[in-house]
Image (cartoon, rainbow, N blue to C red):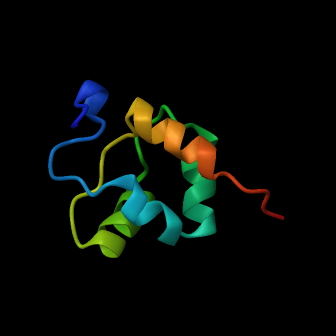
Amino acid sequence: MSNTEDGAGEAGAAGIERWWPHLSIPAKHRLLADLDAALDAQTVDEIETITGGTAPTRLSPAERDFVRTQVEAVD
């Protein structure tokens, strides 16, 4: 089920369902600022710390859809 389009969903990268719930609010905000952009180094580092594995370089279309379903109002 890997999607390698634009480097997204690379083989070996941890699934978003595993790391998204544990990602810090600032990292979520950075990611949400542009879901189509490459992930910044801080967010990649945080994902790799959470998962102990490899972070994607950018989100796949399915991962972007997942994020959109997870967005909650945050003050």
Which residue is depicted at the point 37% across and 34% down?
60
Judge by depth and name the residue closer to the eye, 51 or 45.
Answer: 51
> Percent from the top left, x then y, of residue 35?
53, 37
Seen as rendered, the residue at the extreme top is: 5
> Percent from the top left, x then y, of residue 44?
36, 58
Asked whether, in this view, residue 75 is left or right of residue 39, the answer is right
Asked whether, in this view, residue 23 is left or right of residue 19, the answer is right
Find residue 16 and report its image quarter.
bottom left
Judge by depth and name the residue closer to the eye, 19 or 25.
Answer: 19
Looking at the figure, which quarter contains the N terminus? top left
Seen as rendered, the residue at the extreme left is: 12
> Percent from the top left, x then y, of residue 56?
30, 48
Which residue is depicted at the point 30% across and 67% down?
48
Which residue is depicted at the point 79% across and 57% down?
73
Asked whether, in this view, residue 33 is left or right of residue 75, the answer is left
Which residue is depicted at the point 38% across and 64% down?
18
> Percent from the top left, x then y, of residue 49?
32, 74
Question: Number of callouts in the render?
Answer: 0
Looking at the figure, which quarter contains the C terminus? bottom right
